[in-house]
Image: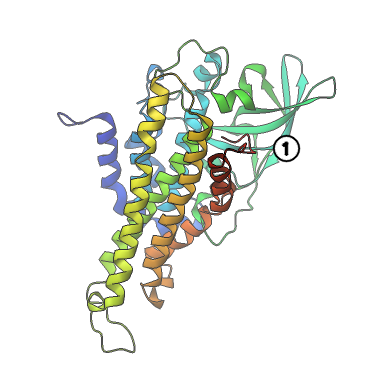
Amino acid sequence: MTTGQTAADAVVQAVADIVPTLRDNGPKAEQQRWIPDENIELLEKADVFRIATPGRFGGLDLPLADQARILAEIARGCPSTGWLAMVWASNAWCATLYPDRTQEEVFADPSVRISGGFTPSGTLTPSGDGYLLNGSWRFNSGCRGADWNIAAAILELPDGTHDEVVAIVPMSEFTIADDWHTSSAEATGSSTTTAKDVAVPAHRVISFGDAILNSTAGRTQLTPGRGYGLFSFVVAECAATFLGMARGAYELFLERVPGRPITYTSWTDQREHPLTQIQLATAANKIAAAEGIAASWWPLLQGRADAGEQPTTEEKALVRGQSAYVIQLAKEAVEILYNASGASAIQRSVPIQRFFRDTQGFSLHALLLLSTNLEVQGRVLLGLDPDTPLL
């Protein structure tokens, strides 16, 4: 780290230095349906996997805005690597929602990588002092390189009632299916993971409500300014990753276009054509608009966290709605640039087609859908109940 450089700046610079390698590794990543070991090693060397780890465990414990900067920079190099880094970082922050004892276990390695999600497609049943976990979880991004896995499940209580909970379990306790064959996000290896009669200690299970509100008991060392709302935190990091993807596609287009002729026309340099100029300006303005919208979240969410407060319902709905809109703008910018790149851009060797396909695929994630999130935001703007607990 140079004089005057913050820890976050140092990580951003380290990631910027490896962007060319991440791009070069894109074809290999897709071919093997998982990012190369080199990508993971370079990210670890750049301290990416410590950005959300609490300082008391040897982590960098960076605020949300700095994490977002770093994730965007990774995605600028490789969309799938950026997505995986986002999953691992956001879930590392999610591990801080668990009791002290659990955190000590999980963060024994400060560069821990954690996969998982919040779709309750498994069951937990009481067994001794803990539980037995059974179920399968699809689209488990990052599972192939994770140390731990977060698994949402339905807790079946002896009296016949049920509760939604979230368990954190060593990844070694799951089997990973070879079922990830996709047209986009191919390099994420987001396979199905399955648990069969896996014993889970009670301290590694928290209620879904406590996870959403960051209100788990049994935590004596909370880092000031890191008590974000769960879904606001996650969708904001997702949106930051899309911003990086859009920036990467923009740079790739600018590298490709000089001196490129337009086939079946008299144009010998695509830069000179008015349509190209309009397309590029439109994409640039969409990216700038998306970045401008996102810039309003960081002080909002950080201000609440610094005050030890959760965002209001109105603020959570705003972040959900605007994050989806930012993602839409970023996706549209990439699509414009891809469509302006000509038929030769469909070749696997041309990186911009990978950015196009990945942004299209990632934007279909249920939590990020534009229609769903605008509905939530619109309901709250109209004074109605948001009609979802995922805020």
Instruction: Tell me the quadrant of the picture where the N terminus can be found.
Output: top left
Residue 115 locus on image (x, y percent): 54, 37
Task: Find disc 1 in the rendering and name its residue.
Answer: 135
Q: Quadrant of residue 333?
A: bottom left
Residue 226 locus on image (x, y percent): 42, 24
The number of discs equals 1
Which residue sits furthest front? Answer: 382
Which residue sits furthest left? Answer: 3
Q: Does 268 sit left or right of 315 as displayed?
A: left
Residue 262 vs residue 375, the one in the foreground: 375
Q: Residue at x 42, y 56 (%)?
A: 329
Residue 208 vs residue 302, the one in the foreground: 302
Q: Does 345 sit left or right of 171 as displayed?
A: left
Residue 158 locus on image (x, y percent): 83, 20
In the rendered image, the vertical position of residue 301 relative to residue 238, given as above or below: above
Q: Is residue 35 something that shows in the picture?
A: no
Q: Residue at x 60, y 54 (%)?
A: 180
Q: Does 77 sit left or right of 180 as displayed?
A: left
Q: Does 69 sit left or right of 108 as displayed?
A: left
Q: Residue at x 36, y 57 (%)?
A: 286
The crowding category of the residue bearing disc 1, from other C-alpha atoms within 10 Å (few below 14, some 14 to 19, many at least 20), is many
Which residue sits furthest top? Answer: 220
Secondary structure beneath dot 1 equals: strand
Amino acid type at image mark 1:
Gly
Q: Residue at x 41, y 46 (%)?
A: 241
Which color scheme did the rendering employ for the protein? rainbow
Residue 282 locus on image (x, y percent): 33, 64
Residue 174 vs residue 230, the one in the foreground: 230
Q: Is residue 321 something that shows in the picture?
A: yes
Instruction: Tell me the quadrant of the picture where the C terminus can be found.
Output: top right
